Amino acid sequence: MTNSPSRILIVKFSRTTILGHLVAVIVLAGTVCQVAVGQVAVSISPSLATLATLATQQFTATVTGTTNTAVTWQVNGVSGGNSTVGVITTTIPGTTGESLYLGPASVPSPSSVSVTAISQADPTKSASATATIQAPSRSGLTFFVSTTGNDNNAGTQSAPWRTIQHAANSVHAGDTLQVMGGVYNESVTIPGSGNATAGYITFESVPGQTAILDGTGINVAKGQQFGLFTLRTNSYIVIKGFEIRNFQSSTGGAVPVAGARSGSGCAGSMDVGDPGGAGDTSATRAVARGAAAEGPGGNAGGGVEGAAAAGARTGGGVAAAGAGAAGAA
């Protein structure tokens, strides 16, 4: 403040934010002047990515010029994306601006999609990356399992294997295992992985049939957690078209899970039904109407165990109702 006998001149400085712009507002003798001090900007990394169908890709958005660094993610202009162009998570918990994109189940037309991060502080500011979706090469073979088969067979349609576990131990990247309709009373641990070059390892019911994985008589010891389908550190795995049922335990601390997944890299979904009542430690019925897919990225769920898991409840709390980075494709 400056004082003189003839006049009083008041100069006031303040700071504010208007649509994400940091602005200095100067009030000088009744006249308002605004001087821009900072401006919101958004960048995204990587700007280009190529991935297989049902694979994952992490994107990171960096926002400057504001303390509000939150962004909204879109795929081809659709918030969160959709099954046609792929889906993308909100920012991964515990990170700054990181999100996980899950490619669609089939190559879209055109094959490239735009992944966009939009500043929540200033929605006029955004950055985009281009993701190109490719079908993984399929150099693998198709094998078969039947309730009338034999694990000493060749695994062909006319001479199928008997157990899904034997098949899981035998297939390689790019292979497809088709399981004929019927009830299979076994727990399956998948030891191998597919890859982006050779393709996914696919476990599926024969089209038009339903293979049922039944947990009757399979015990879960105290402290154990495994599923009728169990994956550890696998990637590029697709499981679809199965009915999973009757996996239960009355032992405290033993958690039955229709499909269990531990480690990183899970993305995808499995539809479930009839999860059991409060206090029922059973995975009574899980129908895989969709697919459970393991991609190469990290688990946006923060280390949650149980991707493609369904129906396990202890005391009314869901012990493992499924984990995935990006939801259903």
Image (tube, grey):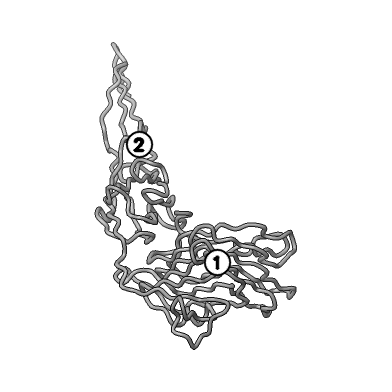
In the displayed orientation, state which residue is furthest to the front.
158
Instruction: Say which of 69 and 180 sits in front.
Output: 180
* Pointer 2 with pointer 1, Cβ within 8 A: no
Image quadrant containing the C terminus: bottom left
Q: Which residue is mark 2?
A: 122
Q: Residue at x 36, y 72 (%)?
A: 174
Q: Quadrant of residue 318?
A: bottom right
Residues 72 and 26: in front is 72
Mark toward the viewer: 2 or 1: 1
Query: Which residue sits at x=31%, y=22%?
Result: 27
Say which residue appears at 46% left-offset and 82% top-offset.
169
- Circle 1: element type: loop
Q: Residues within 10 Å of mark 2 (few under 14, many from 20)?
A: some
Q: Quadrant of the N terminus?
A: top left
Residue 315 image position (x, y, % from top left):
73, 63
Identity, as a three-letter code, of the amino acid under mark 2: Asp
Of labels 2 and 1, earlier in sequence is 2
Residue labelled with disc 1: 306
Percent x, y of residue 142:
40, 73
Residue type at mark 1: give it: Gly
Q: Is residue 66 above or below residue 315?
A: above
- Residue sitting at 29 percent across and 51 percent down? 44
Around disc 1, counting alpha carbons within 10 Å, would you say few (fewer than 14), some (14 to 19), or many (20 or more)?
A: many
Vertical relation: 324 (above or below) 157: above
Q: Quick one: SS at disc 2?
A: loop
